[in-house]
Amino acid sequence: MFYKKLCSYLNSNTLRKIIGFIPIFLFLFIAQVSNSQENKKTSVLVVRGGHPYDTPDFENMCNSLEGVHVDLVLDAHFKAMKLDKIKEKYTAILFLNQNKYYEESEKTKKKYVELTNEGIGMVFLHFTLSSQPNWNKYHEIIGGKWFLGSHTKDKSKVSTYFIDLKVDVKVSDKKHPVTKGIKDFTMTDVFYGKIHMEPGVHVLLDSDNTDIAPIAWTQKYNKSKIVYIMPGYSKKAFENYSYKKLISNALKYVGYME
């Protein structure tokens, strides 16, 4: 009796209609999951300019970072943006900008500090370390400084750089969120030596090359998480898988509000 009723139900129009809706339900479910994942992307403002580098390759890298949505602006645009608008839309800022020729306005200086008071995460790349040679607080925020010859009286303290240098990068802290999923790797780019590092920074990446400084570090400044990553000049860096993962991890880390 039960078997006959089951067969009758399975052959009913009602069941066929239900089965017909299953593909639609699956499509809607997948679309919802996809939208949810998209919404979870870290929203990042990318600020660049002031120094030559492989621009198209950098922009391509930024647009392909896993789990990150970017808006790319020039340094002048960033300076004109209202703090409230930045805070409303972005949880992290990626800087590849430089200004070593003139003193920043007090308004711009105030903006950097206010961003840290608001807890906006910041990732600084490459030549940002040599920007603003006379503005000490800027380098306190980054956690280090590259000494320019034109702004350093003691020439023995002038920082060094190495173009197109192949380096075996060592992960110093394998448990940190920024280095998650990253093993020791090799990359070619421009690297620095003889730099200043703030005492409180936590080194994330290093190497066995004694001529160059630690390659990446992190610290907290006011309410903001800060990460500095030394490479960031050439196509060879921007297409390096481990480097791209490092940038993505760093942006997600600094962009997470605790």
Image (spheres, grey):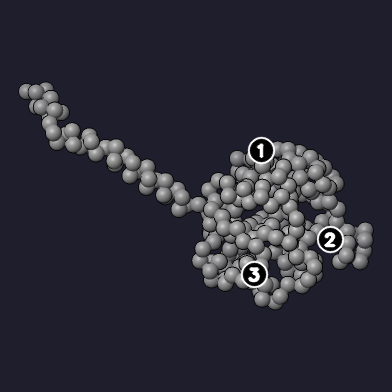
Residue 80, percent across and down?
A: 62, 71
Residue 193, percent across and down?
A: 83, 51
Place residue 135 in its image quadrant.
Answer: bottom right
**Residue that badge 1 annotates:** 183
| Measured Cα–Cα span from mark 2 to mark 1 | 31 Å
Mark sitting on residue 147: 2
| Measured Cα–Cα span from mark 3 to mark 2 | 24 Å
- Dot 3 or dot 2: first in sequence order is 3
Residue 185, percent across and down?
A: 70, 38
Question: Is 136 placed above or below 163 here?
Answer: below
Question: Is 103 placed above or below 127 here?
Answer: below
User: What is the number of callouts on the image?
Assistant: 3
Question: Which residue: 85% across, 56% down?
Answer: 159
Mark sitting on residue 79: 3
Is the C-beta separation of discs 3 and 2 under 8 Å? no
- Dot 3 or dot 1: first in sequence order is 3
Q: Residues within 10 Å of mark 1 (few under 14, many from 20)?
A: few
Q: Could you tell me the amino acid type at mark 3? A: Lys
Mark 2, mark 1: which one is toward the viewer? 2
Q: Residues within 10 Å of mark 3 (few under 14, many from 20)?
A: some
Mark sitting on residue 45: none
Q: Could you tell me the amino acid type at mark 2? A: Phe
Quarter of the image that includes the N terminus: top left
Residue 215, percent across and down?
A: 74, 48
Is the C-beta separation of discs 3 and 1 under 8 Å? no
Question: Which residue: 58% across, 64% down?
Answer: 119
Question: Which residue: 18% across, 33% down?
Answer: 16
Q: Could you tell me the amino acid type at mark 1? A: Lys
